[in-house]
Amino acid sequence: MNRPLPAFAVPSPGGEELALVAGCRAGDRASLDRFFRTYVSYVERVIVRLLGPSSDLQDLVQSTFTEAIQSFDRFRGEASLKTWVTRIAVHLATHQLRTGVRRHVPLELVALAQQPLASDCSADVQVSVRQLARQLYHLLDRLAPKKRVAFLLYAVEEYPIDEVAALTGASRAATKSRIWFARRELLAAVKSRPELRAFLQTSLGGESWR
């Protein structure tokens, strides 16, 4: 996948980042390795948050960095490297959601909460939290991909609406609409399920779910 990446209004990279880009463009192995090591954990997190636990994760991470490396010649410095590579990851994750083909992982690997479970949590509590997380992913699977992605970028990754719009290539109005409808659909789905409603409130960025 090798396509031009549109510009969007986000902070520009500094001199150090531009030097890193220059090295990556030249195929310098040290620069490419630094680029990968700097952003790989973040890219993994974004993809997991958007898709849920999936054995496709590493394939998507690799595709993200492959596309980025192939696109360095078109990097114009109108966005930071983090924003730029995030946009690639978001695009690939959205495409994966649209295909409807995902290989889910076992329950014990499911984890959505932003903070890890406390080490003193009992096994029963850990299983309960993972079951709620799996149920939440099932609810998210009912959302249209564009609504799901916009909502999770806003509620979980805590990007402001303008940046969500930039990352998804949508207008601000369309982005606000997608987030609003996603929230409404999730609220309707958990209306009679207080335990899942509470889990939503703590797991999805502390949003008000009233």
Image: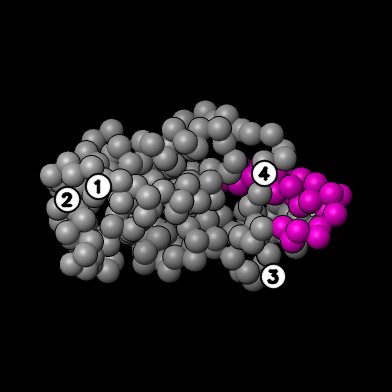
The region drawn magenta spans: 117-143
Mark carried by residue 40? none
Per the image, the residue denoted by label 3 is 210
Identify the residue position indicated by label 4 in the image: 110
**Of pointers 3 and 1, the one earlier in the residue sequence:** 1
Query: Vertical placement of 171 versus 50: above or below?
Result: below
Left or right for 41, reference 52: left
Q: Upstream in the sequence, badge 4 or badge 2?
A: 2
Image point (17%, 59%), residue name: 19
Mark earlier in primary sequence (1, 2): 2
Residue 135 placement, left or right of 152: right
- The residue at which mark 2 appears reads as 23
* Front label number (3 vs 1): 1
Answer whether residue 77 is visible to the viewer in this image.
no
Q: Quadrant of residue 77?
A: bottom left
Secondary structure beneath disc 1? Answer: helix
Main SS type for the magenta part?
Answer: helix
Q: Is residue 163 magenta?
A: no
Residue type, numbered disc 4: Val
